């Protein structure tokens, strides 16, 4: 039977609860255990399909088509494994399931209530991860203790300790310890009150992770230990940092995973974190490097960099693996539309994915600039659609060419509806044409990439593009184009799918690795 670790948050949101959970999962995995993760989000959206990037950052897609916020991406990259739709559960999913069962008469006429029906549904979703091969499940509860919407989740995980048995469930509370600037003194009262909220529900945390801008003094730790009824060595610091990936190492220095394993009565094994340590050391060196590769990310959500979190991580990792420091600069597509020359100072360009017409013409302008000036350019999703529209208009003389998303009756619909007309999401196999640049990059004639789009490249125009120098080098098994290249450019590639979802922190996606290679060569020319 799998052991369960529950991670809750207190005082304020945005403390890095997800990073703490992912760090612990990674550290336990490094000791040779099989770890799975799940996040319970208290909002009533069924999934992240319609969530604004301005609120939750990017939408991350799993192989099976599950959609979650950017935390799901952190989970996959920290754990270096594929997760499923069962790793992100919202109140929308829970309540929809319960209401559906009630409509089918599954509750034998009972009055359907939060307890036991909603809490039972939460536990059912949680216990789905209790597979024979899984040793530990790390479960993050979204929101903050005291929020009315996450109370059913806290009640459900309270019940879990009784059902799982002592030694099979562990509670970790991530809280904020502010510091008074004038006196330089840490204040523990907000954390004490947050723990009391948990205790009132019936949950006694076993470990408290204290987020703070400065290291806690011994007096603060002593107070938290005494008033929160937690062992002194179970007060763990999580000091603010601008490098998320060093967090597991800082927690490891305090024996975070060792303490958790001992409380779960599991064997302590020697951790293997050399590769992670090496990655973090390279990242620290890259921060102070004098010469950095400058890459512009052209998109419309640039005020919210986390809207492109997976791209940022994929690019950073690709640079580190080639001992190159990379600086990703957010550039508004609206600004590029007005003045494409602002891209002149960059060594490479990424044209970002997205939805909607706003900013699309700016992405077209960016694609034109990159193509005409032979700047390494990687276009993803809507960015790749912009690249196709630009090529049609300016190379193939298809005046008025566009996407059916924005103009269903345009004369040259080079981007058309996916058939059947629904969102294509999840991982699908693709065929790569032998002898193409993309074939060389992938080192294979097949691949399996994650999709999240409603519109495809129109196969009707494939031969016209080929005559003019643009090659569709990747196709679906049914022959629908999925990625293109211009062989006469040093790196000009567009993918309808999202390769960033498959990138990892210790082994980036080959497209990003080759892109950084091309960017480095361009910077040195």
Image: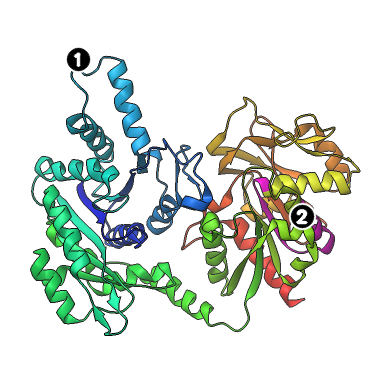
> Where is residue 450, by image quadrant?
top right
| Secondary structure beneath label 1 | loop
Judging depth in this view, the residue of 250 and 101 nearest the camera is 101
Per the image, is 378 magenta? yes
Locate residue 514, reporting x and y percent: 64, 61
In the picture shown, does residue 508 fall above or below 148?
below
> Could you tell me how far apart the alpha carbons at marks 2 and 1 are, in whole angstroms?
60 Å
Q: At 8% across and 49% down in the image, what residue appears?
A: 166
In the picture shown, does residue 87 fall above or below 330?
above
Residue at numbered disc 2: 367
What count of labels does the image hold?
A: 2
Per the image, is 299 magenta? no
Magenta segment boundaries in residue numbering = 364-382
Judging depth in this view, the residue of 476 and 9 nearest the camera is 9
Locate residue 314, reporting x and y percent: 54, 60
Which residue is at the far front? 182
Residue at numbered disc 1: 109
Sequence-wise, which precedes: disc 2 or disc 1? Answer: 1
> Where is residue 90, by image quadrant?
top left
Locate residue 217, reporting x and y percent: 21, 81
Judging depth in this view, the residue of 396 and 108 nearest the camera is 108
Q: Residues within 10 Å of mark 1 (few under 14, many from 20)?
A: few
Q: Is residue 434 visible?
A: no
Judging depth in this view, the residue of 238 and 179 nearest the camera is 179
Locate residue 518, reporting x and y percent: 70, 66
Q: Is residue 249 visible?
A: yes
| Secondary structure beneath label 2 | helix
């Amino acid at each position: 039977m799998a052991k369960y670790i529950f991670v809750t948050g207190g005082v304020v949101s945005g403390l890095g609860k997800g990073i703490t959970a992912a760090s612990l999962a990674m550290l336990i995995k490094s000791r040779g255990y099989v770890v799975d993760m799940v996040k319970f989000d208290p909002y009533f959206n069924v999934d992240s399909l319609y969530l604004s990037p301005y609120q939750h950052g990017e939408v991350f897609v799993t192989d099976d088509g599950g959609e979650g916020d950017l935390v799901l991406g952190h989970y996959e990259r920290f754990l270096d494994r594929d997760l499923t739709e069962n790793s992100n559960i919202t109140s929308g999913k829970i309540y929809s399931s319960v209401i559906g069962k009630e409509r089918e008469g599954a509750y034998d006429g009972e009055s359907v209530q939060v307890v036991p029906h909603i809490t039972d549904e939460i536990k059912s979703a949680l216990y789905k991860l209790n597979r024979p091969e899984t040793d530990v499940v790390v479960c993050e509860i979204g929101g903050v203790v005291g929020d009315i919407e996450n109370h059913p989740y806290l009640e459900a995980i309270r019940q879990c300790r009784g059902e799982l048995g002592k030694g099979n469930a562990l509670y970790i509370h991530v809280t904020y310890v502010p510091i008074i600037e004038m006196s330089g003194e840490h204040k523990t009262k907000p954390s004490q009150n947050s723990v009391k909220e948990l205790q009132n529900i019936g949950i006694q945390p076993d470990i408290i992770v204290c987020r703070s801008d400065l290291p806690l003094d011994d007096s603060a730790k002593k107070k938290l230990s005494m008033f929160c009824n937690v062992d002194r060595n179970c007060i763990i610091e999580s000091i603010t940092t601008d490098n998320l990936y060093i967090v597991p190492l800082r927690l490891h220095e305090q024996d975070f995973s060792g303490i958790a394993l001992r409380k779960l009565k599991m064997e302590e094994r020697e951790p293997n974190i050399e590769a992670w340590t090496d990655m973090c050391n390279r990242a620290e060196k890259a921060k102070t490097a004098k010469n950095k590769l400058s890459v512009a990310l052209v998109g419309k959500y640039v005020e919210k960099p986390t809207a492109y979190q997976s791209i940022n991580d994929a690019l950073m990792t690709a640079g580190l693996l080639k001992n190159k420091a990379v600086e990703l600069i957010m550039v508004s597509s609206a600004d590029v539309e007005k003045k494409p020359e602002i891209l002149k100072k960059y060594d490479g360009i990424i044209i970002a994915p997205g939805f909607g017409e706003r900013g699309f013409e700016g992405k077209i302008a960016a694609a034109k600039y990159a193509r005409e000036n032979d700047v390494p350019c990687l276009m993803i999703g809507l960015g790749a659609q912009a690249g196709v529209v630009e090529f049609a208009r300016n190379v193939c003389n298809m005046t008025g060419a566009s996407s059916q998303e924005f103009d269903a009756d345009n004369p040259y619909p080079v981007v058309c509806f996916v058939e059947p007309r629904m969102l294509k999401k999840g991982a699908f196999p693709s065929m790569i044409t032998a002898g193409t640049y993309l074939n060389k990059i992938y080192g294979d004639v097949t691949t399996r990439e994650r999709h999240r789009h409603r519109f495809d490249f129109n196969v009707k125009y494939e031969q016209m593009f080929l005559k003019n120098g643009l090659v569709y080098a990747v196709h679906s098994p049914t022959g629908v184009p999925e990625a293109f290249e211009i062989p006469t450019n040093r790196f000009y590639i567009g993918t309808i799918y999202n390769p960033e979802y498959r990138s990892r922190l210790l082994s980036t996606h080959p497209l990003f690795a080759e892109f950084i290679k091309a960017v480095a060569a361009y910077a040195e020319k």
